[in-house]
Image (tube, rainbow, N blue to C red):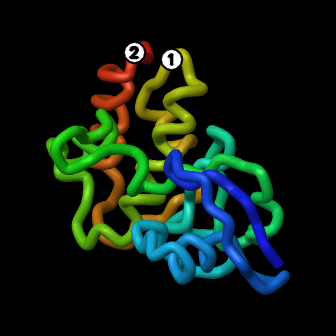
Amino acid sequence: MNVSLTVNGEARVVDVAPNTLLVELLRGHLGLTGTHVGCDTSQCGACTVHLNGNSVKSCTMLALQAEGASVTTIEGVGTPENLHPMQAAFRECHALQCGFCTPGMIMSAIDFVKNSPTLDEASVRAGLEGNICRCTGYHNIVRAVLAAASAMGSRVS
């Protein structure tokens, strides 16, 4: 079956089996390997992408459900020369170790910062719930999200 969608600003038509997950379409069919599969059960958040501007876990969504949608992956957020403020903050605050969870963390964080007029440490920790990092202990991730939130125009308290 064909699914038509826009991925990182580019219109795409991809032939997929009806049971193909969105994460499989992105990684296997389009070669966008920044979206990771960590658990297959929507627990870890490593597969988080934006669907029509909102974060979703792509490991539990069928590709056909994205018909006509706009999907943004980590590859569509910034470039090495022009990082998104969230990407820059993760780098500057040393908010990653192995990097496996980082794309999903960044995609989730961009979404909840965009939708949160005021942020503090507790709201960032709550916003990151559903994204698991097995390396860093979250302290620097929270610092990075707060730094990025400020750069993105949110109020940080």
Q: Dot 2: few (<14), some (14–19), or many (≥20) neighbours within 10 Å?
A: few
Q: Is residue 36 left or right of residue 116?
A: left
SS type, badge 2: loop
Examine the rendered structure and indicate whether residue 71 appears above or below residue 20.
Answer: above
The reply to whether the C-beta atoms of the residues labelled 2 and 1 are less than 8 Å apart is no
Residue 112 visible in this rendered orientation of the protein = yes
- The quarter of the image holding the C terminus is top left
Q: Which residue is mark 2?
A: 153
Along the line of sight, which residue is nearer the eye, 122 or 71? 71
Hey, which quadrant is residue 61 in on the image? Answer: bottom right
Please report the residue visible at 48 percent of the width from the left and 65 percent of the height from the top: 132
Q: Is residue 14 left or right of residue 27?
A: right
Q: Is residue 135 left or right of residue 1?
A: left
Along the line of sight, which residue is nearer the eye, 58 or 143? 58
Q: Which residue is mark 1?
A: 118
Q: Horizontal and vertical percent for residue 39?
A: 58, 80
Q: Horizontal and vertical percent for residue 67?
A: 79, 58
